[in-house]
Amino acid sequence: MNNRFMTLASFTVVLLLITAVGSQSMSAYAAYSNPPSFGGGKALKYSDGLVINGNIIDISKSSQKIANPQILALGKSSTIILKIFDNAGPTTIKVVGLYMNMQGTNLATRGDTSISYTVNGNTVSLSDPHKLLGTVTADYKIVKPFVYVTFHITPIAKMGASNLIVSAVDDHRAIANALIINAIQFS
């Protein structure tokens, strides 16, 4: 009888613990352990991960093609906004990048023109061997659960229709990339 009582008591304690832990409401950040996302993550889905001059583009897949490239006018400031989600919270995003002036569809082959923004240091690094860009700045804001990184770029030379790779790196060096085929053009 004593043995049965102990077994029943142990089972009851385990059941109560499981119920108590299972009923805790966990944040979306703790639910999964994945790299950052532009809308295609397991924890949170959204279709407005990229906005170019007010035009929303769904970049929730690792590769997508748009029908017509977004035209960025020469000599005028344009905005490219990335909406990024990370399971561990918006403050974990450390570096965000744009890679352009590329025609291939291989994510490993980045364009020769790139903009990299380090969020913590609020610094912009530019690689522009063909002198396509004039003024380039970037900033970010957090609207939980997202971080929005806005690039302000002023094209100064023509660039034909180009693919665009957007990239985000979190504090665990997990990387998210999205390829947008036929994304932008400077004219």
Image (cartoon, rainbow, N blue to C red):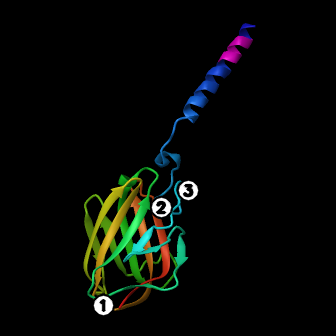
- Horizontal side of 125 relative to 96 (left or right) equals left
**Secondary element at image label 2:** loop
Q: Examine the residues drawn in magenta and state their main secondary structure.
A: helix
Residue 181 is covered by the magenta coloring? no
Is there CB contact under 8 Å for labels 2 and 1? no
Instruction: Kindly identify which residue carries mark 1.
Output: 157
The amino acid on which the numbered mark 2 sits, given as a three-letter code, is: Ser
Q: Which mark is residue 37?
A: 2
Name the residue located 74 percent from the left edge and 13 percent from the top edge. Answer: 4
| Along the line of sight, the residue nearer the viewer: 40 or 116 | 40
Query: Which percent across, then down, holds residue 145?
Result: 42, 53
**The quadrant where residue 5 appears:** top right
Query: Which percent across, then down, holds residue 166?
Result: 43, 71
In primary-sequence order, the first of circles 2 and 1 is 2
Query: Which percent across, then down, holds residue 127?
Result: 31, 78
Count of numbered badges drawn on the protein: 3
In the image, the segment drawn in magenta is 4-9
Q: Which mark is residue 42?
A: 3
In this rendering, the answer to whether 117 lies above or below 101 is above
In primary-sequence order, the first of circles 3 and 2 is 2
